[in-house]
Amino acid sequence: MRIAAIDQGTTSTRALTVDASGAIYVVHSVEHKQYYPNSGWVDHDPEELVRNIIACAKALPDVAAIGIDNQGESCLAWDSETKLPLSNVIVWQDRRTTGIIETLKKRGSENLTLARAGLPLDPYFSAAKLGWILENLPAAQDAHKRGTLRLGATDAFFLDRLTGHFVTDASTASRTSLMNLDTLEWDADLCALFGVPMETLPEITPTTGDFGTLETAHGPRPITASVVDQQAALYGFGCRDAGDVKITFGTGAFALMVTGNTPHRAPQQGLLPTVAWQIAGDPPVYALDGGVYTASAALNWAKSLGLFADFADIGGFDGPSAMERGLAFVPALSGLGCPHWDARARGVWLGLSIDHGPRDMVQSILEGIAFRAAQTIAAMGGIAAQTGPIPIDGGMSRNPYFVQFLADILGREVRRATMPEVTGYGTAMLAAQGAGLVLPALAGFQPFAAKTAPDGAQARFEAACEISQQWKLPNR
């Protein structure tokens, strides 16, 4: 028995299989191009993403079922008849709707989004992006007049295009700011607020179930799970009880903590209630989400600037931390997420001197991402008891200096997944559940025990974050 997962992420699409023993095999991986048409804009080509999913499906061996995970807040428009896209995918990192969001905030509209969706007003979520598409793209406007416009996150587009099922699961819908978090239904007032016609949105379904079939080299195979990538990683780590938390360090860094079968609103801590997953026939499981917009993206940026040549070169540093030597970096290259929620904050280096070189700057970037993750975990600390080790995954988790510094700043043991495909594993576990099968729990972690953190480091970093918010990105 083998279960497949297709992990459609921010930078690549990967296909893997998991067998009954829990053994994982990556069978295909392909990167896709990132487009930056204007300052603050981030696009993907939806046709390229579809081609990559098809290529992943064709590369699969014979499997019993398939799960697909998605980018969460990335979204687009397409036509219900042709199934062709009417816009590019507007990626979760995109900030083009910052002005719209600030106008809504001035009107006092955040009270509505917090009450219904549980989310603050922020360009991160899909709602303002979808409203922007209809407001600005003639192709979407024409399709709306014809009654053929469809709007949604990438999961709904992939499923509609490849299986004929125009649906989105509850975990993905909870990332739009258009779904009522208590009823798991689209909210008419929220749709009106953002200018998104409710009739253009997909049906909301559980995370597991019948999502149609996907053509593989061995014939059509059932898709039995569809889920947001970060929630898939939470499931893959085995987090099931209230207080269980994980952090994934990908393009951005995302901490999720399970809270149980009722949503827990914590706007004062800057935490976002979200649907973690919903097994068909069961009530939804909720979580709190804290996002750091820029993680490995900051390292890739530093590499593109020539600050280092190879990731293997930045796994260790001699001497004290960059913070102890007076150098701090706030990775607000796409704004600040939890607990600040300031879309216009800018990245800053503080304390630069003529004595600092490229390695010092890279070291400070690694530390800045760890500090931001620690801010998020601290915000979660008052919600549910957290005493155990924190599991982590993602590309940055392979950097030993970063992981040890994170453990030191958190003051807790950090366990790095030795298997890098936790998101895909969680997606496969959910797909198995949807097919009436069971995969074993994930095994294999490397512990990093906490050592002494630099004195006053977190307080100095908090002060640096305040400066990053004072140096605002100007309105466009």
Image: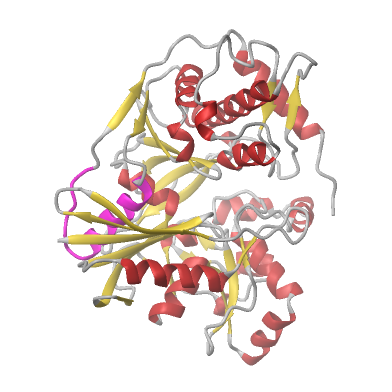
Q: Left of 270 or right of it: where is 247?
A: left
Whether 193 is drawn above or below 259: the answer is below
Q: Left of 443 or right of it: where is 104?
A: right
Residue 98 percent location from the top left of the image: 75, 53
Residue at x-position 38% and y-position 79%: 163
State which quadrant residue 270 falls in.
Answer: top right
Residue 425 percent location from the top left of the image: 30, 50
Quadrant (top left/top right/bottom left/bottom right) for the C terminus: bottom right
Whether 412 is drawn above or below 264: the answer is above
Whether 183 is drawn above or below 391: the answer is below
Q: Main secondary structure of the magenta part?
A: helix
Q: Is residue 429 magenta?
A: yes
Q: Left of 443 or right of it: where is 234?
A: right
State which quadrant residue 35 falls in.
Answer: bottom right
**Range of magenta residues:** 422-441
Q: Is residue 121 magenta?
A: no
Residue 262 can be seen in this image: no
Residue at x-position 40% and y-position 70%: 55
Residue 224 percent location from the top left of the image: 29, 67
